[in-house]
Image: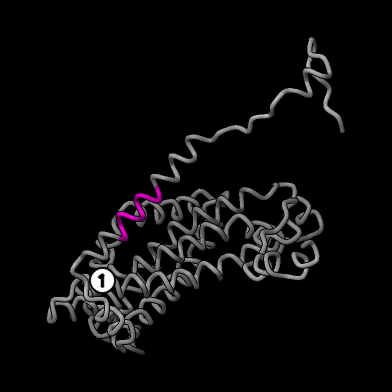
Amino acid sequence: MKTQPAPGITGTAAADLKIVPRRHIGRWIGAAAVVLLLVWLAVSFSRAKINWPTVQQYLAVPVLIQGIGVALVLTAVAMAIGLVLGVVTAVMRLSKNPVVSGVAWLYIWVFRGTPVYLQLLMWFNLALIFPVIGIPGLYSGRMIDLLTPFVAASIGLGLNQGAYTSEVVRGGILSVDEGQTEAAQAVGMTRLQAMRRIVLPQAMRVIIPPVGNEVIGMLKTTSLASAIGVSEILSEAQHIYYVNNRIMELLIVCAVWYLGAVSILSIGQFYLERFFAKGSSSRQLPMTPVQRLSSIFGTNRKAQS
């Protein structure tokens, strides 16, 4: 397709015009600044008094591997509690019953309005309020024996997460057109059936990305559980460097394990988003890492070359 010359410019003059590509000066300045920053960080770490063989040595220490395992299990338990509470609370918030909606709002207000660290300490010291717990005539036990550090951390983190997840779920439910609920009720479904079979499956496309971020955030938040005696990876690393004084080396080991765990969770989030995005969006699904590699080194590229 030939371009028409501008008014007042003859064809010969238009052909003599030189096309000058746009110069992205700001982009090059920004790239240079990033490169300089990376070089400065690399030089700083190379000159720092860090014993890298010690980092490699402690990467495979069983107590630290067990610590990251505890963090992952605590994340799974807390997120399971948070997801169940989040869905229930979100449905309660959308209820037309003012009492049910008010109770859900109060729960969210309390647990979003107080620090996680404070909540963990309160749950761990719950025996000061309820020294004995049980069912009259059937079972009775001391709270201090039942509420171990891991149990207290799971409850505290799970209840706190439920308050945030409920807002994510509520936003996802509100993103689904109200006509979907009306159509479901028109064919005889109850409101709860419509919510479970029609609304929530469609809302998952909106819910999954922020919930995935919450899972990653929860993995890092588990480090606060060391305040009540949970032996996760950071507390175990602290016990070690209090003895050998290799503070930065042990912290780098923790960072490597956290980055590895977060990378695995991010991959899981990516595939979950792809799964729930099928058939619910006009946008093309993003390529998986395998598809990206195939597009670069696959047969299509060879055929084009």
Read off the magenta span: 34-42
Residue 258 at x, y percent in the picture: 38, 71
Predominant secondary structure in magenta?
helix
**In the rendered view, does 107 fall on the left or right side of 283?**
left
- As drawn, 266 above or below 133: above
Which of the image's four quarters has the C terminus?
bottom right
Does residue 162 belong to the magenta stretch? no
Residue at the right extreme, as displayed = 1
Q: Give the color scheme: rainbow, by chain, secondary structure or one colour.
A: one colour
* Residue at left offset 74%, top offset 47%: 179
* Residue at left offset 44%, top offset 51%: 105
Residue 46 at x, y percent in the picture: 26, 65
Residue 154 at x, y percent in the picture: 36, 74
Instruction: Identify the residue under disc 1.
Output: 251
Q: Residues within 10 Å of mark 1 (few under 14, many from 20)?
A: some
**In the rendered view, does 238 fall on the left or right side of 151?**
left
Residue 90 at x, y percent in the picture: 53, 56
Three-letter amino acid code at disc 1? Leu
Which of the image's four quarters has the N terminus?
top right
The front one of 235 and 284 is 284
Is residue 129 visible in this depiction of the protein? no
Label 1 residue SS: helix
- As drawn, 243 above or below 209: below
**In the rendered view, does 107 fall on the left or right side of 204?**
left
Does residue 35 belong to the magenta stretch? yes
Q: Quadrant location of residue 18?
A: top right
* Residue at left offset 21%, top offset 70%: 248
Is residue 74 visible in this depiction of the protein? yes
How many numbered discs sit on the rendered protein? 1
Q: Quadrant location of residue 217?
A: bottom left
The front one of 256 and 295 is 295
**In the rendered view, does 185 fall on the left or right side of 261?**
right
